[in-house]
Image (cartoon, helix red, strand yellow):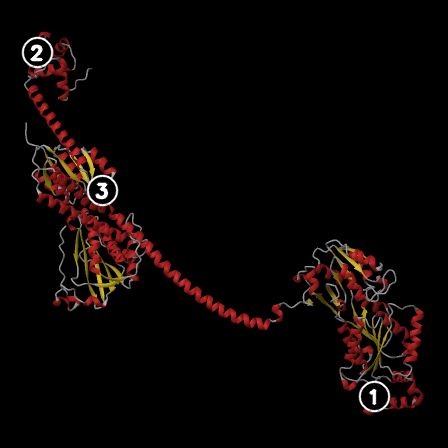
């Protein structure tokens, strides 16, 4: 979808620290964007841009955890690495539960910082890839006719053609034809592959 | 005392007995006297009894008792030297000599001896002497009045006293000796009787009659009449709760004569229990003492009676009476020896031979000396104590204030700890990251030295920043009770604001400082003042918890209060103080905070007052509260800082204050 390089978004109210982190990350080969407050990030963050956020916990105005909440509400799933000058366990647990990628304390060694940033970026990339696959799958499924959709749902639940025909009130032969069409449209080479696709799309594949 | 002429009959009889007169003057003289009853005073001497007295004792004259009695009697009879009384002494020694034959010989002897001696009265001491006198008077001194002393009451009672006899009785009682023994020996169970057999005893005959009654409550061991050696042996082996009652040993069971007082001494030497005694003359010879008869008053009373008789009073008009001659007297040495508690002795007891203690001997001197020493010592001690107490109290107060203040500073730092840690980790984090970035930059080709220089400069700045934070915190955390120094109040405020700013920022509070551009010199402990400002500021910040975000403002001003005082005010835009809170806000342990211990402001007050200042709180008209403290300024406060504009300096009140940026 996009080939844009990932960006590490640094949000910290302390300018010298912000600058130092920028330097070390840039020297390590990352693309970096600086924000002196949570509000600035919210205002300037481009939607869909890949990367991660390095977020200070205690800041005037919106705090780190508050920003995390706000981004989640906005559906922004950029992985967040918290950086705090004085963190406590409850705070870090809460941040991780809320989906933070990592929770680092200042001062942070480059190795550790880079590892966290790497993980966060990998997660972002993975998320994006995953999102892309799903998108393609949905596109294929969207080509099915309503009747084919019904057959698809029953096939992935493991129903035999005869049972499907009984449930839909059609001839077994007709069901067989629909099934063939579903396999083609979904580009599935086997029934097992079709079931995996249904699972990824969140369709209940459980047997009765 | 009034005189009465004796009856003619008596007169005549008396003269008859005085044969020298009878032979020469005969009845003529008597008739003259009889006719002229109111004779002129020239004849008065003849009308009254002759002033001569025969004193008769019943025992050995050298016995101490007898010596005392006869000596005192003579002295008493001659109290008025102008009216001398001639005395004759006869001691009958009945304890050693006795029997009717001896008495008859004595009668014959006295009749011859006093044949031509006019005798006005007979003074008899002791029952045996009285008995002899009464039996012999008619043959020796017919009609001469008789006065007796030292005779037991019941002895007199059983004797039918003829006319012209009177005297004073004494009561020797075994009961008295028992009570004395009980006083000396608590829980007395046995009383051992030592002396002549009672039936032979001149004074203690009635003891035998008392025995049956007294035996009901006490065990008596009667050693009277035993050979002296037996007595000595027995009194040396007495049981613990026993005492000895010694009357008098004149003759022991073997018929040997003893001097009673010496016999007492010998008994006392071997006795293993205390000895109670019946007569004062025994005191000092080994007896512990007791209810003792006193020879001196006995003799005095009897002699006075004689004087009255000699002065013309009829013995019949001087009734016989019992004298008060028994006194509780004890020997101190014996009391000590037997461990007798003086409190147990009868009331009014006289203690003799008390060895005067140093105190008693030199009482006055000791008292004076001790008094002076005591006064001096008290003064010295008082002064020393006072001094110690004061310096101790001062040190204590200093120390405890320092302790509490230090604790409070730590609490203040703890309140700020999160923000301070955050604040400290910012530069540390920057240093680390900058250093690592520099390392990476050094590996790059081409080297961008400008950037590396910039990085190094940033590292230095961050390091300085971290060091400053640590220094400020350490200043506050240090147990600082150093002497006050001259400091600038503005510096104090700056330090505190630096500490406070991160916390204030987190809480969305804007901190403004309006500092007097002049140097505000005060003599104070800088750390303590920082603490005061910190407490006031934290208090204000706490008060703004419920204030809406944009309205949270903390303002600290400094300035001159008047010509000699400087002031600091800390204002907030919080909830302000309720009326009753306003009154009590500086009291220890007063707190409106849920988790406050209420010491911050009271410590602030203590510190300010110790520096000679005052602190107060008031509500601001627009809401919120202002805390103000005033300190005496040093003279140098009026000296402008080098860079201060001279025009701004003149009147303290009009100094223009540059409002510090109130930005957050």
Asked if residue B577 shows in the view, the reply is no
Pointer 2: what residue? A180
Q: Which marked residue is nearer to the observer: mark 3 or mark 1?
A: 3
Asked if residue B234 shows in the view, the reply is yes
Q: Chain of mark 2?
A: A
Q: CA distance from mark 2 to mark 1?
A: 188 Å
Q: CA distance from mark 3 to mark 1?
A: 135 Å
**In the rendered image, the vertical position of residue B578 relative to residue B380, given as above or below:** above
Q: Determine the residue positioned at 24% across, 39% down.
A: A88
**In the rendered image, the vertical position of residue B320 relative to residue B554, given as above or below:** below
- Answer yes or no: are tags 3 and 1 on the same subunit: no
In percent of width and height, residue B395 lies at 37, 59
In percent of width and height, residue A160 lies at 15, 10
Pointer 1: what residue? B45
N-terminal label among 3 and 2: 3
Mark 3 Cα shell of 10 Å, populated few (<14), some (14-19), many (≥20)? many
Mark 1 Cα shell of 10 Å, populated few (<14), some (14-19), many (≥20)? few
Pointer 3: what residue? A86
Q: Is residue B69 rendered to the left or right of residue B135?
A: left
Helix, strand or loop at disc 1?
helix
Helix, strand or loop at disc 2?
helix
Nearer-the-camera pick, A16 or B59: A16
**In the rendered image, the vertical position of residue A24 relative to residue B8, given as above or below:** above
Which corner quadrant of the image does residue A158 belong to?
top left
Which corner quadrant of the image does residue B124 belong to?
bottom right
Q: Which marked residue is nearer to the observer: mark 3 or mark 2?
A: 3
């Amino acid at each position: 979808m996009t080939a844009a390089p990932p960006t590490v978004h640094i949000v910290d109210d302390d300018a010298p620290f912000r600058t130092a982190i920028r330097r070390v990350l840039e020297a390590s080969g990352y693309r970096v964007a600086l924000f002196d407050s949570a509000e600035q990030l919210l205002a300037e963050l481009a939607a869909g841009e890949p990367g991660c956020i390095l977020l200070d916990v205690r800041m005037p105005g919106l705090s780190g955890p508050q920003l995390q909440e706000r981004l989640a509400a906005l559906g922004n799933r950029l992985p967040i690495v918290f950086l705090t000058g004085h963190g406590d366990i409850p705070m870090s647990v809460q941040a991780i539960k809320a989906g933070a990628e990592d929770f680092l304390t200042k001062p942070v060694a480059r190795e550790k910082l880079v590892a966290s940033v790497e993980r966060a970026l990998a997660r972002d990339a993975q998320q994006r890839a995953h999102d892309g696959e799903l998108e393609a799958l949905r596109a294929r499924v969207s080509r099915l006719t309503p009747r084919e959709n019904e057959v698809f749902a029953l096939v992935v639940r493991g129903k035999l053609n005869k049972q499907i025909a009984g449930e839909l009130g059609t001839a077994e032969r007709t069901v067989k034809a629909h099934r063939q069409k579903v396999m083609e449209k979904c580009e599935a080479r086997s029934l097992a592959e079709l079931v995996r696709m249904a699972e990824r799309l969140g369709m209940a594949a459980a047997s009765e | 005392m009034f005189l009465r002429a004796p009856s003619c009959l008596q007169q005549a009889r008396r003269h008859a007995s005085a044969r020298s007169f009878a032979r020469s003057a005969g009845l003529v003289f008597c008739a003259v006297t009889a006719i002229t009853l109111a004779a002129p005073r020239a004849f008065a001497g003849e009308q009254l009894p002759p002033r001569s007295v025969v004193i008769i004792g019943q025992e050995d004259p050298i016995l101490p008792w007898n010596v005392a009695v006869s000596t005192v009697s003579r002295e008493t009879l001659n109290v008025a030297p102008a009216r001398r009384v001639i005395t004759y002494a006869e001691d009958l020694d009945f304890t050693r000599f006795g029997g009717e034959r001896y008495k008859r010989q004595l009668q014959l002897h006295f009749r011859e001896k006093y044949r031509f001696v006019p005798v006005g009265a007979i003074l008899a001491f002791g029952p045996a002497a009285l008995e002899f006198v009464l039996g012999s008077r008619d043959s020796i001194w017919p009609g001469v009045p008789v006065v007796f002393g030292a005779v037991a009451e019941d002895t007199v009672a059983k004797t039918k006293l003829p006319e012209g006899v009177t005297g004073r009785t004494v009561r020797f009682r075994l009961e008295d000796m028992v009570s004395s023994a009980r006083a000396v020996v608590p829980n007395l169970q046995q009383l051992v009787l030592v002396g002549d057999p009672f039936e032979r005893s001149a004074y203690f005959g009635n003891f035998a009659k008392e025995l049956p009654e007294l035996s009901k409550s006490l065990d008596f061991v009667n050693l009277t009449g035993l050979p002296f050696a037996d007595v000595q042996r027995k009194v040396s082996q007495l049981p613990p709760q026993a005492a000895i009652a010694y009357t008098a040993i004149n003759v022991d069971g073997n018929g040997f004569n003893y001097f009673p007082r010496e016999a007492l001494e010998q008994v006392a030497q071997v006795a293993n229990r205390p000895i109670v005694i019946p007569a004062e003359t025994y005191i000092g010879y080994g007896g512990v003492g007791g209810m003792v008869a006193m020879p001196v008053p006995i003799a005095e009373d009897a002699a006075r009676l004689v004087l009255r008789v000699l002065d013309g009073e009829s013995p019949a008009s001087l009734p016989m009476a019992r004298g008060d001659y028994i006194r509780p007297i004890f020997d101190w040495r014996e009391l000590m020896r037997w461990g007798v508690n003086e409190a147990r002795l009868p009331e009014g007891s006289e203690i003799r031979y008390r060895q005067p203690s140093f105190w008693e001997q030199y009482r006055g001197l000791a008292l004076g000396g001790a008094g002076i020493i005591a006064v001096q010592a008290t003064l010295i001690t008082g002064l020393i104590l006072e001094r110690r107490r004061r310096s101790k109290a001062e040190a204590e107060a200093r120390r405890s204030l320092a302790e509490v203040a230090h604790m409070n500073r730590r609490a203040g730092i703890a309140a700020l700890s999160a923000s301070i840690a955050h604040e400290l980790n910012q530069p540390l984090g920057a240093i680390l990251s900058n250093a690592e970035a520099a390392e990476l930059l050094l590996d790059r080709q081409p080297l961008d030295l400008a950037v590396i220089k910039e990085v190094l400069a940033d590292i230095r700045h961050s390091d300085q920043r971290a060091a400053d934070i640590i220094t400020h915190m350490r200043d506050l955390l240090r147990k600082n009770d150093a002497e006050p120094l001259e400091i600038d109040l503005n510096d104090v405020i700056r330090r505190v604001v630096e500490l406070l700013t991160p916390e204030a920022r987190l809480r969305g509070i804007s901190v403004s400082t309006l500092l007097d551009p002049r140097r505000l010199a005060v003599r104070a402990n800088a750390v303590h003042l920082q603490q005061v400002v910190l407490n006031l500021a934290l208090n204000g910040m706490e008060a703004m918890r419920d204030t809406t975000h944009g309205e949270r403002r903390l303002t600290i001003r400094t300035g001159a209060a008047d010509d000699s005082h400087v002031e600091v005010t800390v204002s907030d835009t919080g909830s302000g103080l309720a009326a009753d809170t306003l009154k009590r806000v500086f009291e220890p342990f007063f707190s409106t905070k849920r988790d406050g211990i209420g010491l911050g402001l009271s410590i602030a007050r203590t510190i300010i007052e110790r520096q000679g200042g005052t602190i107060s709180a008031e509500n601001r008209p627009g809401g919120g509260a202002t805390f103000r403290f005033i300190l005496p300024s040093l003279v140098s406060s009026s000296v402008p800082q080098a860079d201060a504009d001279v025009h701004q300096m003149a009147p303290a009140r009009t100094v223009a204050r540059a409002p510090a940026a109130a930005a957050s």
